[in-house]
Amino acid sequence: MRITKQGHSCVRLEHGGAVLVIDPGGFSEPDAAVGADAVAITHEHVDHLAPDRLRAAADANPGLRIYAHASVAAQLGELRDRGVAVVPVAHGDALEVAGFEVHVYGERHAVIHPDIPVIPNVGFRVRAGGAAVFHPGDALTVPQDAVDTLFLPVNAPWSKVSEVIDYARAVGAPRAVPVHDGLLNSTGLSVYRRMAALGLPEGGFVPLAPGESLEPAGPGGGAAG
């Protein structure tokens, strides 16, 4: 499984000619989801869900399928009217998505502040080619099944670095690719990446620049520009 970082919290997964893109939001590249066979959305916040990215993906592939919590699916009526399949998913679901094995974990977004309502959030464990990755969205959900690569949210209004370190240790993946870093400048990136790496085995923290890829997504893989 080839992993490509698409900016902020968006990742592109490729295996066997199929493409699954997770969270092509407003902080990712405008064409982040173009060429996808399927898109998975963790929750409704603009940095994870951007209708223009989804329209661009549907223009490129009329057979596009979108998987998201029912609260997000309800907001995608325009795409459904165009014939795009929008599939509601929830915690505990197991399904095949464009040839990938997908398990859905989690129910709620992390608490930002008691005065801000908590919205639904789902994470996606994706398995293909003998490797498994996990994207938690905006939550610190620990998947029930082991993963080889964790997409680790390193910075957010709802988290602090000690929680990021403890979360990486709780998941126990041998490798983590940092995501949710679009609010950081170069100085902040270096600080957060150094701190977050404390939760991983030596060499297990693998930062990717937007457009940079990693393959295979299993133990022993390496970065490929």
Image: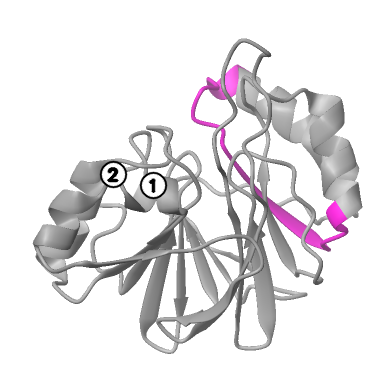
Above-or-below relation of 145 to 50: below
Q: Does the magenta stretch include residue 200?
A: no
Image quarter (top left, top right, bottom left or bottom right) of the N terminus = bottom right
Mark number displayed over residue 72: 1
| Residue at 71% in and 76% down | 218
| Residue 170 vs residue 84, the one in the foreground | 84
Dot 1: few (<14), some (14–19), or many (≥20) neighbours within 10 Å?
many
Residue 154 locus on image (x, y percent): 68, 34
Dot 2: few (<14), some (14–19), or many (≥20) neighbours within 10 Å?
few
Residue 54 locus on image (x, y percent): 24, 53
Horizontal relation, residue 109 to residue 46: left or right: right
- Are the residues flagged by discs 2 and 1 in contact, CB closer than 8 Å? yes
**Disc 2 marks which residue?**
75
Horizontal relation, residue 29 to residue 137: left or right: left
User: Given the image, on which type of amino acid does mark 1 rest?
Assistant: Val
Tell me the SS state at disc 2: loop
Magenta range is 171-187
Horizontal relation, residue 39 to residue 2: left or right: left
Tell me the SS state at disc 1: helix
